[in-house]
């Protein structure tokens, strides 16, 4: 498990967006997607705490991940690319089947 913190802007529109995103994230239960387990809202401090899966190597393009794979340059070995591609497509297919929509999917995820 991992604990991430974030600040949020006040206002009804921002709160509505956050609530929608959290509702979507809580529905995700797939081996290739980071799962959100719980949200803790600190009204006084203006922070939100996200309890989610722990990714010990960070993002695919991160230095720890590349170091783990033995890369000396900022690129992924070809043999790993297809594996990650299949996992990504599997996760996206799950989202499509569950009708979970994302406005943007950053390339690092």
Image (tube, helix red, strand yellow):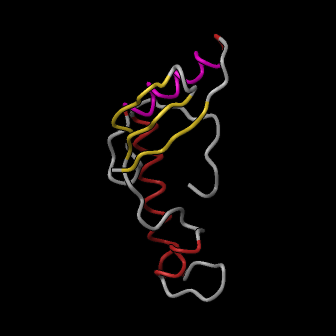
Vertical placement of 93 versus 21: above or below? below
Q: Which residues are magenta?
A: 14-26
Residue 23 lies within the magenta run: yes
What residue appears at the point 67 percent right and 24 percent down from the top-left corner? 9
Query: Residue 55 location in percent, x, y?
Result: 42, 59
Q: Nearer the viewer, residue 41 or 60?
A: 41
On whether residue 13 falls in the magenta region, the answer is: no
What residue occupies the far front of the structure in this picture?
44
What residue lies at 52% left-to-right and 82% top-to-bottom? 67
Q: Where residue 106 sits: x, y (%)?
A: 64, 50
Q: Is residue 6 left or right of residue 96?
A: right
Give residue 43's position: percent from left, percent from top: 52, 20
Return the x and y of residue 90 as percentages of the image width and height: 41, 53
Q: Report the front residue among 86 and 42.
A: 42
Does residue 109 sit above or below 14 in this rendering?
Answer: below
Please identify the quadrant where the C terminus is shown: bottom right
| Residue sitting farthest toward the top | 12
Q: Main secondary structure of the magenta part?
A: helix
Frontmost residue, 5 versus 60: 5
Q: Residue at x 48, y 44 (%)?
A: 4
Q: Is residue 69 above or below residue 45?
A: below
Give the number of callouts. 0
Relative to 10, 96 lies left or right: left
């Amino acid at each position: 498990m991992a604990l991430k913190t974030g600040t949020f802007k006040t206002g009804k529109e921002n709160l509505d967006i956050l609530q929608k995103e959290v509702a979507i994230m809580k529905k995700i239960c797939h081996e290739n997607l980071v799962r959100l387990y719980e949200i803790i809202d600190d009204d006084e401090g203006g922070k939100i705490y996200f309890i989610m899966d722990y990714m010990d190597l960070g993002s695919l393009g991160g230095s720890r991940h590349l170091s783990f794979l033995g890369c000396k340059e900022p690129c992924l070995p070809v043999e790993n690319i297809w594996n990650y591609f299949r996992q990504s497509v599997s996760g996206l297919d799950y989202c499509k089947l569950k009708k979970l929509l994302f406005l943007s999917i950053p390339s690092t995820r």
